[in-house]
Image (cartoon, rainbow, N blue to C red):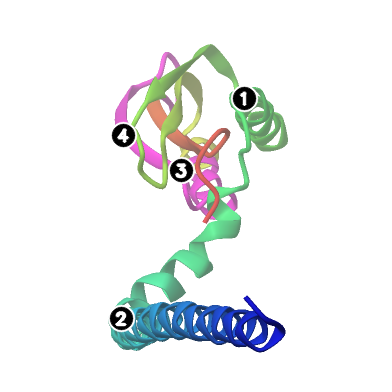
């Protein structure tokens, strides 16, 4: 084999290598373009889904505006008692401020609505005997100072003397300790 044959063979091998490299790069380019089209399709689908979800969110916000405004109005009152001990102290403070004769009092934490806005309540069972006006004014003042509380039962009967009445009242105070943050 002479130099010309050797040069032609080397040149042929070089051309074959370039053709193979070109074909390989062309296949890689085609795979990349296919992946780009797939990714673009996924992106377009995600953009469409996002805009649909945003429309749903706008509709949901519009439909729940009244409820959310109502909750925002009551939230400070609901957070007034963070835990049962604070609720007990708050009720005892109201009793002391009312200067009302307490015959008995008992407190119990009760599971109210698991997963709801108010998961637990502090149930205060109180028995008073004092002046008719003072006792009923105390009950009204408790509802003014703690508007989120609920009087679940109230029983009035004649007291032992004069203008006295005996009031047995059960008050449920919402406890938000451990509630989910919204």
Which residues are the magenta region?
137-166
Q: Which x, y percent locates residue 119?
A: 41, 35
Q: Nearer the viewer, mark 2 or mark 1?
A: 2
Considering only order in the chain, which callout, 4 or 2, is on the residue closer to the N terminus?
2
Residue at mark 3 to residue at mark 2: CA–CA distance: 43 Å
Q: Quadrant of residue 43?
A: bottom left
Q: Residues within 10 Å of mark 1 (few under 14, many from 20)?
A: some
Q: Which x, y percent locates residue 12?
A: 54, 85
* Nearer to us in this view, 102 or 7: 7
Q: Is residue 158 at least partly visible in the picture?
A: yes
Q: How crowded is mark 4: few (under 14 residues within 10 Å), some or many (20 or more)?
A: few
Residue at mark 2 to residue at mark 4: CA–CA distance: 48 Å
At mark 1, the secondary structure is helix
At mark 2, the secondary structure is helix
**Which residue was labeled with disc 3?**
149
**Which residue was labeled with disc 4?**
152
Q: In which quarter of the image is residue 41?
A: bottom left
Task: Reply yes or no: does residue 65 show up in magenta.
Answer: no
* Nearer to us in this view, 81 or 97: 81
Q: Which residue lies furthest to the front in this view?
A: 1
């Amino acid at each position: 084999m002479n130099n010309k044959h050797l040069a032609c063979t080397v040149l042929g091998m070089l051309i074959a290598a370039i053709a193979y490299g070109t074909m390989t790069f062309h296949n890689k380019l085609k795979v990349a373009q296919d992946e780009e089209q797939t990714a673009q399709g996924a992106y377009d689908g995600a953009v469409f889904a996002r805009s649909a979800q945003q429309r749903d969110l706008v509709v949901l916000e519009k439909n729940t505006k009244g409820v959310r405004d109502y909750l925002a109005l009551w939230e400070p009152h609901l957070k007034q008692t963070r835990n049962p001990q604070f609720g007990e102290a708050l009720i005892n403070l109201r009793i002391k401020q009312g200067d009302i004769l307490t015959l008995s009092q008992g407190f119990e934490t009760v599971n109210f609505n698991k997963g709801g806005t108010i998961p637990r309540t502090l149930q205060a069972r109180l028995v008073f005997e004092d002046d008719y006006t003072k006792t009923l004014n105390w009950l009204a003042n408790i509802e003014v100072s703690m508007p989120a509380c609920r009087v679940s039962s109230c029983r009035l009967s004649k007291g032992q003397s004069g203008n006295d009445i005996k009031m047995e009242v059960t008050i449920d105070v919402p406890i938000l300790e451990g509630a989910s943050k919204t």
